[in-house]
Amino acid sequence: MNEDVVVCVVDDDERVRIALVRLLKSAGYRARMFPSGQALLTEALPLNGTATVVLTDLRMPGIDGMALAKRLAAAAVPPPIVFLTAHGDVPAAARAMKDGAVDFLEKPVREEDLFDALGRAADRSREQIERFKRLSELQQRYGRLTPRERQVFSLVTSGMLNKESASELGISEKTIKVHRARVFQKMGARSLPDLVRMAGALGIPEDATPGLSSVGYSAGR
């Protein structure tokens, strides 16, 4: 199971990097090592849906572990972070967990604790990748809607009845029903609650104005 996980080891101590990579490879992980946070940031992370975890020291020259975590958080699919440091303290651990770290381990660390933390981080990475894929699919479906269908999508998911939507857009109720059916078909929605969940995932506000401003609405913004 570990062979589908890439662990990026970031530590300014070469001996530590080599030792960790050897340990990880012995457990079946695909490990890569980086001497600094900057080195990791300048090299692209896997983009092919591969579960990726960053195992990093906290205190390093230049970009430290905390700064690295914040930079990585801006990625489309941020890799989960596991901190491993000899300088652990409660405030640092609290900040690390708040910034999305999966675990905060102190050196020397037991192999069992390290592998447990990496397992949790890998699970989170897989979940994030799946969520990203689902959102991308929804955005593609939404992009296939016509401007009028997007208006109807917004009105329907805001709770308006067909008659109310027709009045809002100045068209017949029959035409609203046609557009509504096309929205359901193109979005792959099985029910109204299903369509409402899609609107939430796409970030479409419930009170979105159905006028001309919503015609150019871009999913995910």
Image (spheres, rainbow, N blue to C red):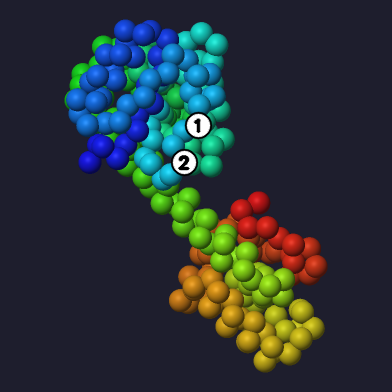
Q: Nearer the viewer, residue 105 or 11?
A: 11
**Residue 169: where, in percent of width, then height?**
77, 79
* Residue beneath the point at 35% across and 29% down: 7
In terms of image quadrants, where is residue 112? top left
* Residue beneath the point at 54% across and 77% down: 184
Please say whether residue 20 is visible from this viewpoint.
yes
Residue tagged 2: 47
In terms of image quadrants, where is residue 116? top left
Looking at numbered disc 1 in the image, what kind of residue is underneath it?
Ala
Q: Is residue 65 above or below residue 29?
A: above
Residues at discs 2 and 1 in contact (Cβ within 8 Å): yes
- Residue 44, which numbered label? 1
**Residue 187: where, in percent of width, then height?**
54, 71
Q: CA distance from mark 2 to mark 1?
A: 8 Å
Q: Is residue 166 above or below residue 42?
A: below
Q: Is residue 19 above or below residue 207?
A: above
Q: Is residue 212 above or below residue 25?
A: below
Please say whether residue 155 is visible from this viewpoint.
no
Q: Dot 2 lies on which element?
A: loop
**Residue 219: where, in percent of width, then height?**
63, 58
* Residue beneath the point at 53% across and 18% down: 38
